[in-house]
Amino acid sequence: MIAPETLSRWQSALPFWVSLLLLPLVWIGACAGGWTVLLAPLATWYLFAALDGVFGLNLENADPQTPDDDLRWYSTLTMIWVPVQALSLFGLIWYVTHTGHLSVLEKVMVFFGMGVLTGTIGINYSHELMHQRSRLERWLADLLLAMVLYSHFRSEHLLVHHRHVGTPRDPVTARYNEGFHRFYPRVLRQSLRSSFRAEKEKLARKDRPWTDPANPFFRYWALQAVMLALALALGGWGGLALFLVQAGTAVWQLELVNYVEHYGLTRKYLGDGTYEHVKPHHSWNAAHKASNWLLINLQRHSDHHYRPDRRFPLLQNYADAQAPQLPYGYPVMTVAAMIPPLWRRVMNPRVRRWREMYYPEITDWKPYNKARNPMPR
């Protein structure tokens, strides 16, 4: 008989396991073809947007002192996703390249849908795992990122983004009035350079060259090579091309979320190359219940920057007076981000109100809007 405490913990974690229900949708598309190849992206974007309207907001907070033993069902989810995603991704590569009922377009759309999941869920779970102290969890994060050829995200996120968020030194902080179509190529270029530079500087502080085996980029490149070789072995050149479709889609999904999370929010420059400490009001938040189930509370982003090692069920919600709130959850906001005029109409007035609320003394915001750092380093 299951103990009441165990049953209660399992029931509270169960809504977050909804992500596992999306993978069968990709397989349905691969097996049935036709319009069903759109099931996975439609469910991820539009179904959860609708469910946010049905379930509303979750403003409750768990006890942040809850011990890890009580969070086992939550941490198990993020770890079990890794083999499940790998089996689905590489199983699909073998299946799709060895069947004749799908057109080229249908095959591409199947892997577009898979990329929506490896980006929306897989990279998000890797984000949770990379912040933990467990070596196993960090390795699992590396495996998820290697499956989308974006392994440097771990170094960029831990060494650059969390340190420089809300400043021109952070490539991932979207500038005011910077449309996603300008943000995206800039981030792809700058985040790779900044992550490598951060690891190189970290080794230099220990009097080691960047070629030292401790540089994680060697692990990143090796894992990515394994993923590419596996795709090629299972599906030939067609399988490799479909793997790349999936990876490109996943990275696009990640950077859409990055764009939304800090758009237009900046930390005050204090002089002498320093900025104020990161505060809750330097991240956009959304308390929408269904999309937080899907994204394991990623939308409680202010608390994540306050306590990066805090596991997702313990992330705290912030009220309007403490942190800026998005009008909708990420599923809606990322779609809006792809339409720059709509995005500016929705978000720019909110950014201006945020500036008036937190920094009424700043009258010249031009230096904060530039993509390159105008301040002394």
Image: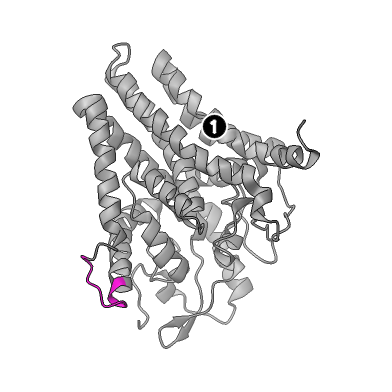
The answer to which image quadrant residue 155 occupies is bottom left
Q: Residue extending furthest front?
A: 1
Q: Quadrant of the N terminus?
A: top right
Q: Is residue 312 above or below residue 372?
A: above
Residue topped by disc 1: 20
- Rendered residue at 73%/57% (across/down): 63
Visible in this render: residue 188? yes
Q: Residue extending furthest right?
A: 4
**In the rendered structure, which segment of residues is drawn in magenta?**
203-211
- Judging depth in this view, the residue of 254 and 18 nearest the camera is 18
- Judging depth in this view, the residue of 289 and 185 nearest the camera is 289
In the rendered structure, which amino acid carries the disc numbered 1?
A: Leu
- Judging depth in this view, the residue of 346 and 197 nearest the camera is 197
Q: Position of residue 126 (x, y in %)?
A: 46, 48
Visible in this render: residue 339? no
- Rendered residue at 46%/32% (across/down): 84
The answer to which image quadrant residue 325 occupies is bottom right
- Rendered residue at 66%/37% (across/down): 15
